[in-house]
Structure formats: structure tokens, C-alpha cells
Image (cartoon, helix red, strand yellow):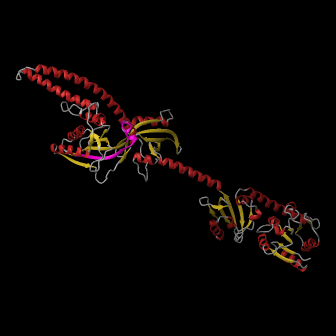
């Protein structure tokens, strides 16, 4: 009966001899010189019997047998092993599922055994067909064979225990060997990997890159690193390609699964980006203080210390601290590095950029930075907070002083009334030219001055009556400006009045008194002449700004009076609204003008504050609540309202 037979052996002489033998017996024979070629033949040829050499290149016989047993079209095919190591390899060959095993030897003996396989019926159990017991010369050959097999198995065990995927790639790019690690990294069993075109294992975008690596005929190793890994069945892998010298373009490829590493790097990068985002966008200035230098500052630290954004070079921290605070801050820094317990948060002043003074609050944690002791510092700008606290304390102090001043003014006024009454009675019937009349009139004059002082005290104490009416502050300020310019020609006045200014409910007489008082103060601060800037503006005050003043947020009209005079220092600025505080010499003033102005503005539900620096002039701002009544003759709807928080 004619059989379809496939012969697979890398020995061409044996192939020709056995092929001629079987062809003469009337069988249809195809041949292949290695396992890879056999797979090509099987695409167009389905044999009944397959003779397989166990030791050959490009997919050896053992791996080829495992592949054949998984092919559905060959489930009934007889597989016969041809091996020079049949005796030594018997146990492993039987495990491959072959139907028969023939030991390679003399050709006539092999031919007899091959024809025996074809002429008899075989069950699926493995059988050994052999010749006589080997003589001494043959035994020596077998011992050599056994030693070679042990060496190969030793290398096989090593390769199978490696986690990396190791592939032997033929010159056409197909896989002829794959270890256990290769199956794990590809997710495919060895039988499905062998004979596969290697680049096809990877994502489509990576195939061209891999093919170029394999086609490169240079004899040096090539590598695709974890910086730009390959995609392999949802895994990321690196690839090392090592050419095999003198082996017709074959290469060894080693794949390493770096999926977990890349995921960890991605997670770490994401975490770093998240913390970097928090670090760079924190409201606090964050930096490392080491060896007295500011290191690793965030954006807020760069801003608050006035560093160069592009290249924030290290600067000495104490150089940024206010001179009056340096010793205390330096001592805390020393104690922090020494590991001594100290209060983690404390406030002090720093010098910002052009020696502008800021209040800051510092929280410090001892750390090690680049293997050296350091202080991790969190610094917060509390200048506005301190300013608000100052306003609040000033408001409380002024309220207390106002209560006291009001009580004193009432009692003092009562005394003045008694003195005035007695002086008037004493004058009655007196000769106007008498010395007594002159003295009594002097008493009445001093009583009038005392009454004027009482009125100022009552104004500061917010106890004076006022007659509010809708008032256009632009018109009121223009009247004050005209009167001031007439008498103080050495001062140049620069008005900026907003069109469509909002109306306010005020007593125009009292507000005009306040404005004139501020203009006169400005004139006195500029004995050699100067400039006076008057401005009105619609504005909206936020809750955070007004809460320390005890007024409601909302729409206000701001009046600014700014001069270019000698200015004031911080200590003077804190006390300017207090009664009887004056910087003038004795006899030039009682120190009640600004106190009265402050009381009048507060009595109208407004705010009055001042800012100044020595030699840089002063600015007084008045905020009066806007009326719901529209400004008569408003112009064009120019009613811009800023937001002041």
C-alpha cells in the first residue's frame, strides 16, 4: 500500500539513501533538512508516516515531534524517531509520543528496520528496534555520546531556569528555539512559538523596527532599552540581539519583561508629578535650608526671596532676614540642626527684593538632604494677616480711646459752661476799659478754644450729630481743591475724578472738613513745595478686607489723597489717628485734626486708613459706602468697580 512519507534529517546522504529506498517501494516521499523546513513542507503535504532525526538545527527533532502531535491533520500520522542517541535518550523520546524509534547505525540495518516499520501494523506504544548488543568500540562511542547529551541537558536546564525569554532566530526571521522564559513573556506555549516569524509577535508599530534589527548583518550586539521598550501582548519588553558568527545570519534574541518596572516608573513619575504640582503651586514658600543656604526652592520661594526663576542660584538665608531678627532666627536654625526641641512655627520679618519688609511665618522640620543634615522649611507670607490684625487692634484701641474721649469731652464741656457762666456774670456791669474786663475776656477766649477742642473730641468719639444727604464726592472734592489751590499756590494739585461716581449719604460739611484737614496736613508735610494727588474711584470691598473694620462689604467710593512729602515711619503711622498725637512742635497743633477726621468717617460707616514710607510721601484713603441713589447726570455708564479683598 502506497504511503505518503516525510523524511526529516540534516544528513543529506541519509536523506537521499532512504528517499531512494522508499521511492522504489512505491511510496510518495518528501524530504526536509531541519525542523523549520519540515514545517514549510507540511503546509502543502500531509504525510502518513514521518521519520524525524532527533538532533538537527533549526528546531530539533524533539521539539518538532511536540509540534506535530499538536497538529490536528497529523493526529493519526505515525512518527518514527531516527536518532544516534536512541539508547541514551530512550525515556525522553518515549515521552514525545512517537510510535517507533530507530537507532542510527549501518545503512543496511537502518533500511531493514525502516521497511519493517512500513510492513507491520504498529500500535501507539513506543518500541525500540535495534541490532545486536554493541561491542567495546561501540561502547566507547556511546559513553562519548552520553557525555555530550549530559552537557546539552546541563545547558538546557540553565536556559529553562532563566526568566528572560531567549530565542534562536533563523536568517529568515523565524524562531527555531525558545526557552521557558520565552513562553512566559509571549504568553504562548513553545510549540506555538517555534516556526513563528519573530516580528509578528509584537505590536504592529514595533514590527518594522524589529525587522531592521534582524536584517542588520553587522556582527556587533544591538539593544532596545527600557527607555523605548517594545509592546508584546500588553507587556513591555527590552530586546538584546546577539549575532552568531559564522552561522548563516542566525541571531540570539533575549527579551526581558520590564512591564512591572515601567509601571512602577510610571506610577513613580505620576506621583512625582503630583507632588511636584503640589510643591510648585503651594501657597507657602518651600525650600531646603542647608549650611545656611536656600536650596531647592519652589515657585513661591523664588518669588518671595526675589530669586531668578530661570536659575535660582543658592543664596544665604540670613541675608534675607531683617537685621533685627537675624540673631534669633540663626539661633533657632542652630538648635534645629542640633536636634534640640524647639517651637516648630515662629514669625519674623524678611527683606523682600528692594528691601521691602514682609512678615513671614516659618515651620521647620529637620531632615537629611544629599547625605547632610538640613532643615525642610515651609514659609508663609503673613504680611496681610499682620496688617489686618494691626487694623483690628487699632480699631479696638481707637474705639476704647473714643469712649474715653467722649466721656472726658462731656465732663470738660460741663466745666467750660460753668467757667463761661461765671465769667459772663463777672463781666456784667463792669467798665469795659477796666483791667478786670480784659482778664475776663481772656478767660472767655480760652473757654472758646476749650470748646473747640471738645468738639474735636466729640467728633473722634463719633458723638457729633450730622445731617446726611445724597452727595456727589467729585463736586465736594473739587470745591475743596479750588479753595486749597487759592491759598497754597506752592503746591501743584493733580486731580483724577472718575466719571459716573456713585452717590454717597454723608454730611457734606463734615466730609469737606475732613478733606480740607487732609490737604492741610499734606501741605505741612511739603514745606518746600510738592505735588498733591486727589482721586475718586468706585470700588467694591470684599468681606475679608472689611471684617476688621466692622463695616459691611459692598460698593464704596474711595477718595485718595496722596502727597510727595517727607512721609512717616512705621511707628508714627501706627499712632496718627490717636487723639493728641502730633509730630509738630509745641504750640503748632493739638493733635486732634486726624483723630477728628477718623471719627467723622467712622461715624458715616466708612473706613479711613493711611500708608507711608519715610521720604516717599503719604497716602490717605477714605472709603464711604455708596448710596443706592444714582448719580445725577451720570456720564456714559463709566462705573467701573474694582474688587479689593
Quick check: 117 left or right of 241? right
Q: Residue 274: x percent and y percent?
A: 54, 49
Q: Is residue 585 above or below residue 216?
A: above
Q: Is residue 296 above or below residue 250?
A: above
Whole-percent x, y for residue 588 in the image: 18, 33
Q: Residue 67 lies in what quarter of the image?
A: bottom right
- Magenta region: which residues? 532-553
x and y percentages locating residue 449 in the rendered image = 18, 28
Q: Quadrant of the C terminus?
A: top left
Residue 518 in the image: above or below residue 444: below
Place of residue 551 in the rendered image (x, y in percent of width and height, measured from the top left): 36, 37
Name the residue nearer the viewer: 243 or 29: 29
The reply to whether residue 447 is visible in this rendering is: yes
Q: Is residue 429 magenta?
A: no
- Residue 429 placement: quadrant: top left
Residue 616 visible, this orientation:
no
Please state, as top left, top right, bottom left or bottom right, where the N terminus lies in the image.
bottom right
- The quadrant in which residue 200 appears is bottom right
Q: Residue at x 27, y 38 (%)?
A: 468
**Residue sitting nearer the eye, 334 or 99:** 99
Q: Is residue 547 magenta?
A: yes
Q: How many marks?
A: 0
- 425 or 92, nearer to the observer: 425
Q: Is residue 500 or residue 601 the one in the foreground?
A: 500
Q: Is residue 165 left or right of residue 448?
A: right
Amino acid at each position: 500500500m502506497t504511503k505518503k512519507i516525510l523524511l526529516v534529517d540534516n544528513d543529506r546522504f541519509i536523506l537521499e539513501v532512504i528517499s531512494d529506498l522508499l521511492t522504489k517501494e512505491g511510496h510518495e516521499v518528501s524530504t526536509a533538512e531541519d525542523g523549520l523546513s519540515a514545517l514549510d513542507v507540511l503546509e502543502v503535504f500531509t504525510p502518513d508516516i514521518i521519520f524525524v532525526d532527533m538532533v538537527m538545527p533549526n528546531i530539533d527533532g524533539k521539539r518538532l515531534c511536540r509540534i506535530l502531535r499538536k497538529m490536528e491533520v497529523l493526529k493519526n500520522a505515525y512518527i518514527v524517531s531516527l536518532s544516534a542517541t536512541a539508547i541514551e535518550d530512550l525515556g525522553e523520546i518515549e515521552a514525545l509520543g512517537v510510535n517507533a524509534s530507530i537507532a542510527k547505525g549501518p545503512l543496511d540495518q537502518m533500511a531493514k528496520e525502516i521497511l519493517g516499520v512500513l510492513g507491520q501494523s504498529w500500535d501507539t506504544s513506543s518500541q525500540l528496534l535495534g541490532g545486536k548488543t554493541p561491542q567495546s568500540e561501540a561502547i566507547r562511542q556511546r559513553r562519548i555520546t552520553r557525555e555530550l547529551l549530559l552537557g546539552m541537558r546541563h545547558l538546557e536546564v540553565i536556559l529553562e531556569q532563566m526568566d528572560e525569554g531567549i530565542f534562536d532566530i533563523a536568517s529568515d526571521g523565524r524562531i527555531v528555539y525558545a526557552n521557558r522564559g520565552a513562553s512566559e513573556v509571549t504568553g504562548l506555549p513553545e510549540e506555538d512559538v517555534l516556526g513563528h516569524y519573530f516580528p509578528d509577535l509584537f505590536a504592529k508599530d514595533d514590527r518594522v523596527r524589529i525587522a531592521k534589527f534582524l536584517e542588520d548583518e553587522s556582527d556587533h550586539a544591538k539593544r532596545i532599552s527600557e527607555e523605548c521598550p517594545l509592546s508584546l501582548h500588553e507587556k513591555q519588553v527590552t530586546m538584546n540581539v546577539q549575532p552568531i558568527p559564522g552561522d548563516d545570519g542566525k541571531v540570539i534574541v533575549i527579551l526581558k519583561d520590564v512591564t512591572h518596572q515601567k509601571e512602577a516608573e510610571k506610577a513613580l513619575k505620576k506621583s512625582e508629578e503630583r507632588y511636584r504640582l503640589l510643591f510648585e503651586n503651594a501657597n507657602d514658600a518651600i525650600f531646603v535650608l542647608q549650611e545656611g543656604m536656600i536650596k531647592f526652592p519652589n515657585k513661591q520661594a523664588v518669588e518671595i526671596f526675589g530669586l531668578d526663576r530661570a536659575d535660582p542660584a543658592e543664596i544665604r538665608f540670613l541675608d534675607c532676614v531683617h537685621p533685627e531678627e537675624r540673631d534669633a532666627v540663626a539661633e533657632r536654625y542652630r538648635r534645629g540642626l542640633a536636634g534640640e526641641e524647639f517651637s516648630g512655627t515662629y514669625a519674623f520679618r524678611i527683606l523682600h527684593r528692594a528691601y521691602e519688609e514682609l512678615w513671614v511665618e516659618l515651620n521647620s522640620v529637620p531632615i537629611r538632604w544629599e547625605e547632610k543634615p538640613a532643615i525642610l522649611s515651609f514659609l508663609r507670607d503673613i504680611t496681610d494677616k499682620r496688617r489686618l490684625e494691626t487694623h483690628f487692634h487699632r480699631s479696638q484701641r481707637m474705639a476704647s480711646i473714643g469712649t474715653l474721649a467722649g466721656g472726658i469731652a462731656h465732663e470738660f464741656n460741663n466745666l467750660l459752661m460753668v467757667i463761661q457762666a461765671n465769667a459772663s456774670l463777672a463781666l456784667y456791669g463792669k467798665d469795659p476799659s477796666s483791667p478786670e474786663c480784659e482778664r475776663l475776656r481772656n478767660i472767655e477766649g480760652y473757654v472758646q478754644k476749650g470748646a473747640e477742642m471738645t468738639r474735636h473730641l466729640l467728633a473722634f468719639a463719633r458723638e457729633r450729630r450730622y445731617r446726611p444727604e445724597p452727595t456727589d464726592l467729585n463736586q465736594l472734592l473739587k470745591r475743596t481743591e479750588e479753595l486749597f489751590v487759592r491759598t497754597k499756590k506752592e503746591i501743584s494739585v493733580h486731580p483724577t475724578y472718575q466719571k459716573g461716581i456713585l452717590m454717597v449719604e454723608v454730611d457734606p460739611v463734615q466730609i469737606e472738613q475732613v478733606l480740607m484737614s487732609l490737604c492741610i496736613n499734606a501741605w505741612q508735610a511739603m514745606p518746600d513745595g510738592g505735588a498733591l494727588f486727589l482721586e475718586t474711584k468706585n470700588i467694591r470691598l470684599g468681606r475679608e478686607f472689611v471684617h476688621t473694620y466692622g463695616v459691611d462689604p459692598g460698593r464704596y467710593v474711595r477718595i485718595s489723597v496722596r502727597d510727595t512729602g517727607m512721609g512717616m515711619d512705621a511707628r508714627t503711622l501706627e499712632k496718627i489717628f490717636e487723639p493728641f498725637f502730633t509730630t509738630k512742635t509745641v504750640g503748632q497743633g493739638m493733635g486732634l485734626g486726624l483723630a477728628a477726621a477718623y471719627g467723622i468717617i467712622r461715624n458715616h460707616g466708612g473706613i479711613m486708613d493711611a500708608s507711608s514710607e519715610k521720604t516717599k510721601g503719604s497716602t490717605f484713603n477714605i472709603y464711604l459706602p455708596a448710596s443706592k441713589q444714582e448719580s445725577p447726570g451720570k456720564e456714559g455708564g463709566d462705573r467701573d468697580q474694582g474688587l479689593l479683598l
